[in-house]
Image (cartoon, coloured by chain):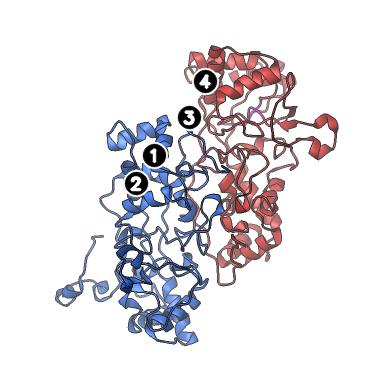
Chain colours: A blue, B red
Amino acid sequence: MKRITVSLLSLGVLANSPAFAQEPISPISPVKQINLAQVELGKKLYFDPRLSKSGFISCNSCHNLSMGGTDNLQTSIGDKWQQGPINAPTVLNSSMNMAQFWDGRAADLKAQAGGPIANPKEMAFTHELTIDVLSSMPQYQVEFKQVFGADKIDIDQVTTAIAEFEKTLVTPNSRFDQWLLGDANAINADEKAGYDLFKNSGCVACHNGEAVGGTSFQKMGVVEAYKTDNPAEGLAGVTGKDADRFKFKVPTLRNVEMTYPYFHDGAVDTLGEAVDIMGRLQLGKKFTAEENAQIVAFLKTLTGDQPQFTLPILPPSSDKTIRPTPFK
Amino acid sequence: MKRITVSLLSLGVLANSPAFAQEPISPISPVKQINLAQVELGKKLYFDPRLSKSGFISCNSCHNLSMGGTDNLQTSIGDKWQQGPINAPTVLNSSMNMAQFWDGRAADLKAQAGGPIANPKEMAFTHELTIDVLSSMPQYQVEFKQVFGADKIDIDQVTTAIAEFEKTLVTPNSRFDQWLLGDANAINADEKAGYDLFKNSGCVACHNGEAVGGTSFQKMGVVEAYKTDNPAEGLAGVTGKDADRFKFKVPTLRNVEMTYPYFHDGAVDTLGEAVDIMGRLQLGKKFTAEENAQIVAFLKTLTGDQPQFTLPILPPSSDKTIRPTPFK
């Protein structure tokens, strides 16, 4: 399938465009232009807990690919069981985000990947020790050299490989995408009614595009304030602008059935409650129970094929490898 | 390949037996008589952190199949980052053990599987809550019904499925097994010299059979006492017999290059040091540096094909699923 990019301006002029060209949500495209050697290396790094001080926490601990690319916890568990400050966003389809983290402080996946490794509340390691650990293992040495052609491993290679693996974590072929691509029976009447409500009520103003989100920052609590104990201030922490307080990156709704709990504070467990709150706080609408159920039914059609791959086998540490220190 | 069981008594009478019939170590046999539906369900359960109170710890957390079926930590990390009492043994080839846990307190894999779930220092959950969680998810309900034919999920089904998956976690085709099966070039001269030392020095008296261990309990520190801060007393805790103090199940040496750190207290990081200590404390032998290196080289030939499987995708929680409580 060819990827078709449709801007709002061009909608009117594409006479022979497929059905989805008329829709504000576009189907997920297959992954293209991938460096497969980097992907295989990045997959190992993604699953390697030796990138943490404790030797226990890997990227996959909080962005678990068995569980929709999240940990399904309100906020994550970090080194020494520290409570994370914010809900872990899904890694699935995250390459489609305009920026990474809830506050967009990382421009892309590569910039994001180095963050948790060195965050004392998350993996609690350092980039220097990460390189020491990886360089101490002959298998990693050989693989990095094969992939990057350099004699020394560096953090830029590490984050490049992890990001390349993450680019493969897309979830095509959801029932909604099948419908977008022309299979009228891929979603049922309730689900279609839910989609119509989603469009006509204004949800789609923010949740649009290939990822059904990830394309803008929006204030949490437009019509009515959002009450939370979570102190996160969102985009304002990056821009320093008071106008950006409580602005967060609009999360993707792809696979949203799997990425509970919801919102930046992970305070909401169910899709029904999330839809109700979004309707009231962002749109000033109180959906009826039937409308709510229809929107939830639509949202569940956004679950796509989960990434399928063989669990990587990690190179063993050598006698020279620095050992983890979980209890120090 | 047919599995050939050779008892010591029968060695003399097998005129046409293969080469390995003369050896105290036998090659790993392929897995047979497996219930594949149970395996697929058990694989999901093995990777499902919702079998823990925190929603963060799964079987795979401490018996990580990317890392030789262990966590490569001295002692494991449990709920709320509690420090475990003993080194996590590898799950690989564990079906070959005469009993499970270092002190053999579980007769088999099924009996073992329920332990960590309900251990307040490990997964810190209860069997009742485990069943509540699993029963709340339609996908699990259907799969359990398909596999076991019963209307209700129970803990016996859970541990049966996990154990069945674990039975598939064998590592055939190591270079040493290739040599046993007749490929004279599968191991080099140093590795062969190491094996001869391993046999002739007496290591093989305890480390024998298909798993190169797992067939007996032995005292840690026979010739010379083993010094450790770890308070584990081993088999005595199960039998109540003073004579069983510091007796531990002899660990498998299959994949031992991957299952560091070594011994029940996980105090030793390298194979060289482990071989030196075993020689002195168990056999009263001080291996030379060359002998030590040869034995280590032999031990590294015991690394087999690691289990290859697709990372399982877990059923999402439903609105009724009890949520994890990592910080309560």
Judging by the rendered image, the residue that carries numbered circle 4 is B297
**Secondary structure category for the residue under label 3:** loop
Callouts 4 and 3 in the same chain: no
Q: Where residue A25 is drawn, which disc sits there?
A: none
Quadrant showing the N terminus of chain B: top right
Amino acid residing under circle 1:
Glu
Q: From the viewer's perspective, tell me whether residue B231 is left or right of residue A267.
A: right
- The magenta span reads B209-214
Callout 2 environment at 10 Å: few (<14), some (14 to 19), or many (20+)? many
Q: Is residue B167 above or below residue B323?
A: above
Label 1: chain letter: A
Please report whichever mark, 1 or 3, sits nearer to the chain's N-terminal start.
1
Please report whichever mark, 3 or 2, sits nearer to the chain's N-terminal start.
2
Q: Nearer the viewer, residue B137 or A165?
A: A165
**Which callout, 4 or 2, points to the residue nearer the camera?**
2
Q: From the viewer's perspective, tell me whether residue A137 is left or right of residue A269.
A: left
Judging by the rendered image, the residue that carries numbered circle 3 is A318
Callouts 4 and 1 in the same chain: no
Q: Residue furthest left?
A: A13
Judging by the rendered image, the residue that carries numbered circle 2 is A159
Q: Is residue A46 magenta?
A: no
Give me the C-alpha separation between circle 1 and circle 2. Answer: 13 Å
Contact between marks 4 and 3 (CB within 8 A): the answer is no
**Secondary structure category for the residue under label 2:** helix
